[in-house]
């Protein structure tokens, strides 16, 4: 893959869709399609050539893992199109990663006769994808601070990236310590991830899509749900430096003995805000503790949990800043949900990130 | 306070009540009453003399913080009784700790005319209480392993207790690093504590008391609620050593796009089990990470969250063992919910734990 001159496309995508990556100098004569099938979402990344055949674009799509039929139909179209373009007899390769690469392998193979489906390790793909974005794509990585007039401050693209912690937030959360190209350990994880937020939110608010849930949380007030330090102390707990406004207990205002609350006793928007704080704060804290344990100061947050949602990024940024006393940095990506599939598509031409410049 | 010969009473208490501590050599001629008012529960510890005036007992009571009237009525009876016993004109002292010592100070003062209410710092009381139990009371501290025929294995009482981590799980969670008598730091905390479990459980299961919730969880199956590694991979994720049975995403099976689930779509017992695992696993993981950061190997779990519940203790023990690779130990106490109030009652006679033996 020739990534020279690569950039994020200026074309504004449809709502909740992801911007293309323009590759002006990459010519591909083989199909480049990769999938990353997770517990909740199945992601596809694929390359299309420009009409004039000079360069092309990487496209990013996602489906619910539950909607496997829709997902397979989309891949069939991509494969059909690739077959039409390529010389007869060319072998088509589809790279597949995520747990679903194993879980749905037989089904994919049956639906795509003649396609060579190759499984790739999930964690390797995540890191290869992340390294691609960090090292090659300008205006991709940013820190987030809602206090500033432009809350996204982009980092310069750089090759000096190690060591770092990758916190990938899908249905669950994986924490990877990365010390060099292809040198990584999964140091920790937590089951309190996107699946937890979406599961609890759908039970408690009736919201029917991720984006509806996030929208609700924007106008919610968690003080009606959470027990704050001030609710217990009547003021700050000054001796320990705990402010009255600090959350002492998530959902701590809900339970009252003998009072039969239902979810309708509370505003769904307040519940949504409280849940979002609960899960994001917790991930931020666990990320900090692992970064501390492994002496890492740069923490990249990936995965579809984030969805460019300002409250989420702000909560994660605040947690890292608070716990590390300003020493560590929370870093986000515009293509945060597509690290694994992008890593897998990089593998279609045996592309590995190294300290050298990369050509196909 | 003369604690020589102190022991846990053999008398079996009423269900959900706490055993007395027998103090055969302690004579008190002043009232010893202490309260610890938290976000959810208000605890009382008080001393009564034996009928023959040789020694006596410490009693342990709890009320919902919401039921302040009941709580105050109980204290009024204790105070009235103390006044009847003591010489006229003796000043009665009530030690008060927890956030409610501040929040409800004026109300207590108004309800208890002539009583000198003295506030004590919550964290100091927790540690003083814990030290009292560890150093003085046999058959108090235990490790828990459900695999063994008698899952509670008691530790010898000891004076060589430092350093250790205290994880106090009330509505919220405080983590205290204790390095010597009166030498401690609150190193961390999490808002995902008892209040979170009780709040979410009451919304999602309709349970109306803590013990009802814990009872429900006993027969629940979290596999119907949580997404396991095997649900994503179809098997173990062997390369990373993640077993198929491991929880990848708490509540990860709940959300389905376009399907409007309610809490009635799932068994309340399954939900209860999943919630209990979620909160307990998370506290165990955060406890481990903090113990690791501060080089501590003994982790005491206190607070009313635990309630002697076997699944909770097992989950916490498993988490500490799993993350620390067997290096750290989770320690429990029979009077886990009364550390703060017991610490405060110790202060009634200016009792401080030290390396010397303690007399009044």
Image (spheres, coloured by chain):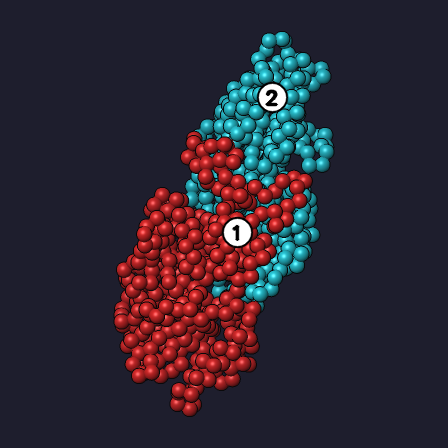
Chain colours: A red, B cyan
Q: Secondary structure at mark 2?
A: helix
The percent position of residue A230, horizontal first and vertical second, equals: 49, 35
**For residue B186, side relative to residue B319 (left or right):** left
Compared to residue A15, the image places residue B268 above or below, namely above
x then y, percent, for residue B234? 57, 68
Are dots 2 and 1 on a single chain?
A: no
Of the 4 image quadrants, the one containing the C terminus of chain B is top right
Q: Chain of mark 2?
A: B
- Foreground pick, A100 / A22: A22
Front one among A7 and A88:
A7
Q: Nearer the viewer, residue B201 or A204?
A: A204
Residue at the spot of label 1: A269
Q: Position of residue B44 (x, y in %)?
A: 61, 28
Q: Residue at x 61, y 50 (%)?
A: A263
> In this view of the protein, can residue A245 be seen by the observer?
yes
Direction bottom: furthest residue: A88
Q: Is residue A191 left or right of residue A144?
A: right
Q: Nearer the viewer, residue B240 or A96?
A: A96
Quarter of the rendering occupied by the N terminus of chain B: top right
Outermost top residue: B88
Q: Residue B25's quadrant in the figure? A: top right
Between tags 2 and 1, which lies in front?
1
User: Which element is circle 1 on?
Assistant: helix
Say which residue appears at 42% left-offset and 88% top-offset.
Answer: A84
Q: Total of numbered circles in the picture? A: 2
> Is residue B221 visible to the viewer in this orientation of the structure?
no
* Left or right: A53, with B202 as reference point: left
Q: Report the residue marked by disc 2.
A: B111
The 10 Å Cα crowd at callout 1, few under 14, some 14 to 19, many 20 or more, is many
Q: Look at 64% across and 46% down and name the residue there.
A: A261
For label 2, the crowd category at 10 Å Cα-Cα, with few meaning under 14, some 14 to 19 and many 20 or more, is some
């Amino acid at each position: 893959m020739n990534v020279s001159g690569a950039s994020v496309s200026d074309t504004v995508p449809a709502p909740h869709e992801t911007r293309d990556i323009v590759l002006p100098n990459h010519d591909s004569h083989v199909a480049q399609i990769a999938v990353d099938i997770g517990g909740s979402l199945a992601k596809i990344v694929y390359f299309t050539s420009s009409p004039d055949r000079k360069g092309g674009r990487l496209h990013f799509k996602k489906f619910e893992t539950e909607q496997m039929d829709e997902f397979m139909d989309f891949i069939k179209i991509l494969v059909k199109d690739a077959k039409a373009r390529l010389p007869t007899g060319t072998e088509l390769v589809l790279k597949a990663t995520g747990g679903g690469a194993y879980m749905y392998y037989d089904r994919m193979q049956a639906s795509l006769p003649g396609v060579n489906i190759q499984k790739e390790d999930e964690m390797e793909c995540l890191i290869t994808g992340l390294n691609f974005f960090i090292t090659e794509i300008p205006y991709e990585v940013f820190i987030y601070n809602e206090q500033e007039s432009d809350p996204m401050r982009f980092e310069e693209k750089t090759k000096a990236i190690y060591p770092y912690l990758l916190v990938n937030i899908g249905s669950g959360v994986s924490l990877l310590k990365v010390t060099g190209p292809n040198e990584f350990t999964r140091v920790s994880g937590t089951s309190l991830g996107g699946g937890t937020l979406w599961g609890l939110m759908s039970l408690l608010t009736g919201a029917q899509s991720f984006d509806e849930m996030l929208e609700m949380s924007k106008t919610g007030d968690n003080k009606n749900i959470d027990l704050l330090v001030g609710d217990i102390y009547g003021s700050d707990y000054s001796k320990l430096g705990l402010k009255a406004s600090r959350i002492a207990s998530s959902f701590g205002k809900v339970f009252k003995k003998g009072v039969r609350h239902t979810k309708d006793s509370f505003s769904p928007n307040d519940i949504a805000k409280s849940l979002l704080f609960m899960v994001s704060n917790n991930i931020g804290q666990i990320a900090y503790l692992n970064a501390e344990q492994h002496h890492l100061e740069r923490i990249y947050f990936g995965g579809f949990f984030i969805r460019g949602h300002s409250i989420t990024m702000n909560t994660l940024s605040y947690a890292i800043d608070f716990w590390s006393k300003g020493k560590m940095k929370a870093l986000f990506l515009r293509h945060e949900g597509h690290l694994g599939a992008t890593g897998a598509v990089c593998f279609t031409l045996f592309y590995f990130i190294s300290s050298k410049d990369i050509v196909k």
